[in-house]
Image (cartoon, rainbow, N blue to C red):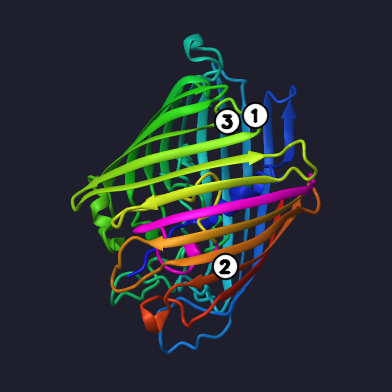
């Protein structure tokens, strides 16, 4: 049985780093922002094609697959400091999504998914200057349906969005795991229920405590408690995360998901420039304690941007490793960067029992255009279920902010596994799979 990460949602976050910042249409503004109400609209549509599949079905022709995805998110958000103490903020939104065509080559969607559902519904309070020892807004409490992201890679959001084709329980094909498709775009990011308390702001010593109930049936509707502590300076931050599994819905449990109940996860992490101008470093080492034993995962990356050179070329290297029984939890990737396009989305598990080396190179001809190239080497640590997912992948893509509201993101990827279906792998045939996508992001 294959499991899939929900790393594709990080492609959405990554776009924010090239200019697609959060925007909204201002409906009401009193006293220069004392009270603000915004209308929010976010949409995406993607066209995809691949000449191989990873369905594990010898009856399925290994020919080219074509599929499409789309979504639109619409709602309201606002804030006010016209209360007795501190300030209030909140948001309410809906999402409509769907998948079309053949479905994806990883067998998560079949092209018949459609859904409209509640997305954000949260309310929060910030303390302003009520607690001077904690700094301005040193207390920040929020609850409801909201996106929650921790530093590092253990909790990114609740973005795993499979469709009707995802049936990980043998004999079950009732569509219980369908979350509305749009698997790659992955716009459903909010946790179903949450309570988050942040203390100390973002500088010096600060931390958080939270309770999260995962909404995705593909994540077995897991419930967890978590805490973080960090120390942040101008050179970067060092911190630690602790996660405890509280509950798993047995109706949606598969594989080793029941081990999430009672599981403990610990990590040490850091990020920053270490005092080197234009440099960027990050790492995290994590350990899981569950009934079947201990598991480990880690990553390290280092990058440098040549800001004084034309087009500002940037290069970075990342090493990551997952032990054989590692549970990927609610990770979206490492630092807004996917573990490959074909590799992590469709071609089998690269988030357990795997060692990955990858390099990224990018240039920025203009402020609104970024060209990127990535190389991945996936090496499976040991054979699992007689299958080997070792492979190499190259991805070439660009992010072009055509207007203040529209960004285009075409990509071509080349994925070559060491093994294919007839020799102990998963790909439907030997050779290189050519994968192409074209995505339009819109935010108003």
Q: Residues within 10 Å of mark 2 (few under 14, many from 20)?
A: many
Chain-order first, disc 2 or disc 3: 2
Foreground disc of the pair 2, 1: 1
Instruction: State the mark number for residue 98.
Output: 2
Can you name the residue that lies furthest to the top here? 132
Q: CA distance from mark 3 to mark 1?
A: 7 Å
* Residue assigned mark 1: 277
Q: Position of residue 166 (x, y in %)?
A: 41, 70
Label 1 sits on a secondary structure element that is loop
Note whether 338 is above or below 165 in the view shown.
above
Q: CA distance from mark 2 to mark 3?
A: 41 Å
Q: Position of residue 387 (x, y in %)?
A: 34, 73
Residue at figure coordinates x 61%, y 28% from the top left: 276
Foreground disc of the pair 2, 3: 3
Q: Nearer the viewer, residue 29 or 238?
A: 238
Image quarter where the N terminus lies is bottom left
Q: Position of residue 64 (x, y in %)?
A: 58, 82
Q: Position of residue 47 (x, y in %)?
A: 65, 70
Q: Nearer the viewer, residue 395 or 176?
A: 395
Determine whether label 3 and label 1 are within 8 Å by CB. yes
Q: Could you tell me if residue 138 is visible in this image?
A: yes
Residues in magenta, as a range: 341-367
Q: Is residue 190 left or right of residue 298?
A: right
Residue at figure coordinates x 40%, y 81% from the top left: 421
* Residue assigned mark 3: 273
Residue at figure coordinates x 60%, y 57% from the top left: 374
Q: Nearer the viewer, residue 28 or 237?
A: 237
Residue at figure coordinates x 52%, y 19% from the top left: 127
């Amino acid at each position: 049985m294959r499991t899939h990460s929900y790393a594709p949602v990080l492609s959405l976050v990554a776009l924010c780093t090239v200019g697609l910042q959060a925007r909204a249409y201002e409906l009401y503004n009193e006293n220069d922002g004392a009270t603000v109400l915004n209308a929010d609209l976010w949409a995406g549509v993607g066209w995809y094609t691949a000449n191989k599949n990873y369905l594990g079905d010898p009856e399925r022709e290994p020919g080219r697959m074509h599929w499409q995805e789309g979504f639109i998110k619409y709602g309201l958000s606002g804030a006010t400091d016209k209360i007795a103490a501190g300030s209030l903020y909140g948001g309410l939104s809906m999402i409509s999504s769907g998948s079309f065509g053949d479905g994806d080559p990883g067998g998560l969607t079949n092209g018949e998914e459609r859904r409209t559902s509640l997305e954000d519904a949260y309310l929060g309070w910030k303390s302003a200057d009520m607690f001077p020892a904690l700094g301005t807004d040193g207390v920040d409490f929020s609850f409801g349906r909201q996106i929650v992201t921790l530093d590092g890679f253990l909790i990114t959001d609740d973005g795993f969005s499979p469709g009707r084709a995802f049936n990980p329980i043998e004999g079950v094909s009732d569509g219980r795991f369908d979350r509305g498709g749009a698997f790659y775009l992955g716009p459903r990011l909010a946790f179903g229920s949450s309570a988050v308390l942040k203390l100390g702001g973002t500088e010096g010593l600060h931390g958080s405590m939270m309770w999260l109930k995962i909404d995705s049936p593909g994540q077995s509707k897991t419930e967890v408690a978590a805490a973080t502590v960090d120390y942040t300076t101008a050179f970067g931050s060092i911190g630690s995360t602790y996660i405890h599994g509280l509950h798993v819905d047995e109706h949606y449990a598969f594989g080793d998901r029941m081990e999430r109940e009672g599981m403990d996860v610990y990590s040490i992490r850091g990020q920053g420039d270490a005092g080197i101008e234009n440099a960027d470093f990050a790492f995290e080492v994590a350990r899981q304690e569950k009934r079947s034993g201990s598991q480990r995962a880690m990553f390290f990356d280092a990058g440098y941007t040549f800001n004084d050179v034309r087009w500002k070329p940037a290069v970075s290297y990342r090493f990551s490793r997952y032990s054989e029984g590692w549970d990927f939890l609610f990770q979206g990737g490492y630092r807004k960067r996917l573990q490959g396009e074909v590799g992590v989305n469709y071609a089998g598990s690269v988030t357990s029992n795997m060692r990955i080396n990858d390099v990224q190179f990018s240039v920025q001809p203009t402020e609104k255009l970024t060209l990127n190239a990535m190389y991945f080497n996936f090496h499976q640590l040991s054979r699992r279920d007689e299958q080997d997912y070792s492979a190499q992948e190259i991805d070439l893509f660009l992010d072009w902010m055509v207007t203040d509201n529209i960004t285009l993101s075409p990509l071509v990827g080349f994925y070559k596994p060491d093994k294919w279906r007839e020799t102990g792998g998963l790909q439907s045939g030997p050779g290189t799979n050519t994968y192409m996508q074209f995505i339009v992001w819109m935010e108003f």
